[in-house]
Image (cartoon, rainbow, N blue to C red):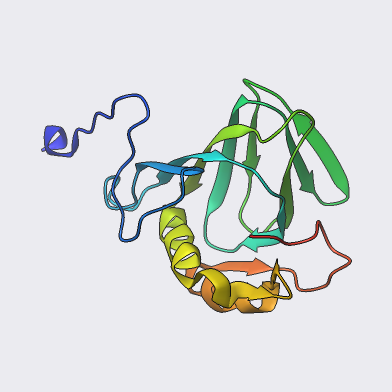
């Protein structure tokens, strides 16, 4: 029955996961909660996310606070509170904080699974680093399991960091 899946979180509350996530990530609905349909995270984007492609999931981002820069193709869009973007699977894109500090966003992946990638990335920690920076080639070893590819060409997108 549908009421068996009812979920209610208080302000500031997050769903538990396989590994503890840093405060910048709050899982609101897991893939298991939604029977695989989507996952929902509240994210504070403190650093640029380099150009990457989701091969299996559409990614949606709704800005709650701050300014988010979204680069898709050769164009960068500036989103503020209340603005939304759909990043279709197969379309390379990058995300960066805009002016005024890290934005707080809701991130939805459909079908779900993005929270599992975040857990795998946090669990791998320093093994993803080279010379103090996130190494896209190392990251792709994990991202590939989740249908995501980060561009390894340094000329593409922003400087990768974890």
| Marker count (numbered) | 0
Give the residue displayed 74% in from the left and 75% down from the top. Answer: 131
Left or right relative to 139: residue 98: right
Quadrant of the rendered image containing residue 120: bottom left
On the rendered image, what quadrant is the N terminus found in?
A: top left
Quadrant assignment for the C terminus: bottom right
Q: Is residue 40 above or below residue 31?
A: above
User: Residue 46: x, y in percent?
Assistant: 65, 44
Residue at (31% x, 54% y) in the render:
17
Which residue is outermost to the top? Answer: 82
Closest to the observer, 34 or 8: 8
Q: Would residue 49 be found to the left or right of residue 14 on screen?
A: right
Identity of the residue drawn at 55% across and 50% down: 58
What is the quadrant of residue 84 in the picture?
A: top right
Q: Position of residue 103 (x, y in %)?
A: 64, 33
Residue 41, percent across and down?
45, 41
Residue that lies at the very extreme toward the front in this rendered image: 132
Residue sitting nearer the eye, 94 or 98: 98
Q: Is residue 94 above or below residue 146?
A: above
| In this rendering, position of residue 138 left or right of residue 42 | right
Q: Quadrant of residue 115?
A: bottom left
> Who is closer to the viewer here, 116 or 75?
116
Instruction: Give how far across and how far down residue 8 sits, in percent.
Output: 24, 28
Q: Is residue 152 left or right of residue 105?
A: right
């Amino acid at each position: 029955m549908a009421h068996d899946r009812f979920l209610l979180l208080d302000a500031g509350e997050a769903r538990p996961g396989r590994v503890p996530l840093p405060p910048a990530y709050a899982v609101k609905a897991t893939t298991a909660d939604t029977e695989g349909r989507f996952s929902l995270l509240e994210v504070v984007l403190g650093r640029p996310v380099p150009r990457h492609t989701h091969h299996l999931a559409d990614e949606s981002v709704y800005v709650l606070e701050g300014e988010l820069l979204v680069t898709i193709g050769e164009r960068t869009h500036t989103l503020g509170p209340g603005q939304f973007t759909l990043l279709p699977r197969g379309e390379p894109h990058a995300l960066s904080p805009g002016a005024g500090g890290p934005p707080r966003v809701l991130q939805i992946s459909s079908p779900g699974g993005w929270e599992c990638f975040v857990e795998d990335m946090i669990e791998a920690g320093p093994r993803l680093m080279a010379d103090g920076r996130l190494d896209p080639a190392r990251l792709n070893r994990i991202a590939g399991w989740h249908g995501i590819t980060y561009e390894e060409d340094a000329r593409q997108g922003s400087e990768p960091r974890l």
